Amino acid sequence: MKARLVRHSKVTDELGNTMEIKLWQVAPTADKSHGFKYSLVYIVAGERVIGYDNGERQGDHRHYGDRQEAYIFTDLRTLADDFLADVERYKEHMT
C-alpha cells in the first residue's frame, strides 16, 4: 500500500510560531501496527520545542524540549488532542 496523505496543515499561531501536522495512512508494519505515520511539530524561533512522530524503526514517541519519551498511540483524534494540549501548556509557561 502506498502512503496516503490524510492531513497536512501548517499554520503560524498568534505568537508567530509554526505548528505543522502531517498524517499518512500506511500499510501496518512492526513499528506502525496501527497503520499510520505521523509528524506533529511546534517550532519556536526555528527550533522544535514539541514533536510527536514515529520515524522509521523508532516507534511512537514524543519530544518535549530536550526530552524524548514513548507515546502510546490510540487514534488520530487523541494524537492531535495530546499534541495540542502540550502546545497550550508550553504557551502558558512562556507567557
Image (cartoon, rainbow, N blue to C red):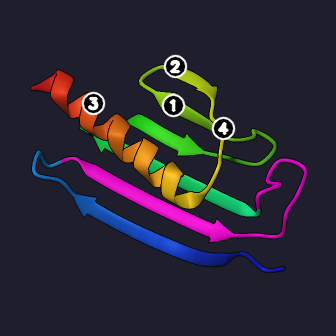
Q: Which residue type carries mark 4?
A: Ile
Q: What residue lies at 55% left-to-right and 34% top-to-bottom?
A: 62
Are circles 4 and 3 on residues that touch, CB within 8 Å?
no
Q: Is residue 19 visible?
A: yes
Do labels 2 and 4 touch, CB within 8 Å?
A: no
Q: How far is the residue under mark 4 from the one under mark 1?
A: 13 Å
* Residue bounds of the magenta highlight: 17-34
- Residue position marked by numbered label 2 in the rendering: 67
From the image, state whether disc 2 or disc 4 is nearer to you. 4
What amino acid type should be assigned to the residue bearing mark 2? Arg
How packed mark 3 is, by other alpha carbons closer than 10 Å (few <14, some 14-19, many 20 or more), is: few
Task: Tell which circle, 2 or 4, labels the residue nearer the N-terminal end.
Answer: 2
Of the image marks 4 and 1, the number of the one nearer the N terminus: 1
Dot 3 or dot 1: first in sequence order is 1
Give the secondary structure at mark 2: strand
Q: Which mark is residue 72?
A: 4
Q: Residue 14: x and y, percent?
A: 10, 51
Residue located beneath label 3 in the image: 89
User: Which disc, if any, is residue 63?
Assistant: 1
How far apart are labels 1 and 2 at the CA level?
6 Å
